[in-house]
Image (cartoon, helix red, strand yellow):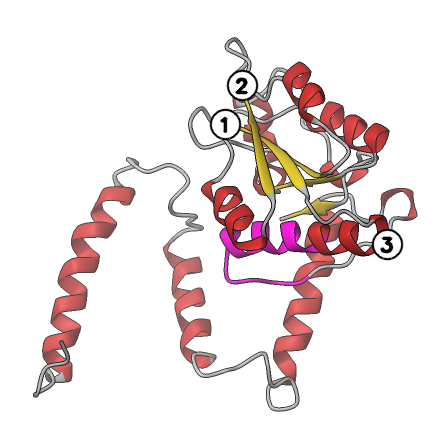
Amino acid sequence: MLPETGLPAQRIRAMLRESAGAENAVWKAGKCSGSVYHGGAEHQALLNEAFSLYSLANPLHADVFPSLVKFEAEIVSMTAALVGGGEGGRDVRGGTTSGGTESIILAMKAHRDYYRSEHGITDPDMVCCITAHAAVDKGCEMLGIRLKKVPSDPRTHTMDLSALQAAIGPNTILLYASAPNFPQGTVDDIPAMAALAKRYGTGMSVPAITDFQRPSSALVLTSSPLPTPLSCPGLDVMT
């Protein structure tokens, strides 16, 4: 219920500092994984200043805020270069979103719309591992996509490729890979999944988290160097 009298600004600031201090202490102690992406105190200060300067900016109105268009284009270009976007002459395009969940759902929507328009698939399904991000479940419910979940390999804790291949059907529009997954932090076999996507004519989407951490991820998460995802034929979307 909205209170009749609001709190003074000083009290609000004190409440926020108290709660933020207690919660930040948890991840600063190294007890969180996949929750906070932190580049150091100096970098955080820069981000806070940037957020403050653009707190009222609205990207819907590019005529009023043209710098937002410039920033987005630069971010997309830099990211594409980091993940092999220029290899093989691939035409890579992208956009920024509010976060991982929206990115995943937009990738799903793009595939649903494309396969409905170009292939007449009106009852689409997609395949992911049981370890996939929760946004996949949310997106399927929102977009009317039937979700097929396959088990992970008990030894590698990555998607069972045999189960994946068996789950692909005539209405499959998308294969979803984890890089990494949340339960074990392992990376699915992206090249093998991309090859299946190309063979069966489905789309394939993968989060790009590990390609920004390749020196450490290659050692911790897999026994072989991680491929640059956009260099894999059959992979068409990174989120």
C-alpha span from label 1 to label 3: 32 Å
Find out whether the residues at labels 1 and 3 contact each other: C-beta distance under 8 Å. Answer: no
The structure residue drawn at horizontal position 61% and vertical position 63%, both measured from the top left corner, is 96
**In the depicted view, which residue is nearer to us: 44 or 89?**
89
Q: Nearer the viewer, mark 1 or mark 3?
A: 1
Q: Residue 139: x, y in percent?
A: 54, 50
Find out whether the residues at labels 3 and 2 contact each other: C-beta distance under 8 Å. Answer: no
Residue located beneath label 2 in the image: 152
Q: Residue 54: x, y in percent?
A: 47, 79
Amino acid carrying mark 1 in the image: Ile
Find out whether the residues at labels 2 and 1 contact each other: C-beta distance under 8 Å. Answer: yes
Residue located beneath label 1 in the image: 130
Residue located beneath label 3 in the image: 91
C-alpha span from label 3 to label 2: 33 Å
Identify the mark nearer the N-term, 3 or 2.
3
Q: Main secondary structure of the magenta part?
A: helix
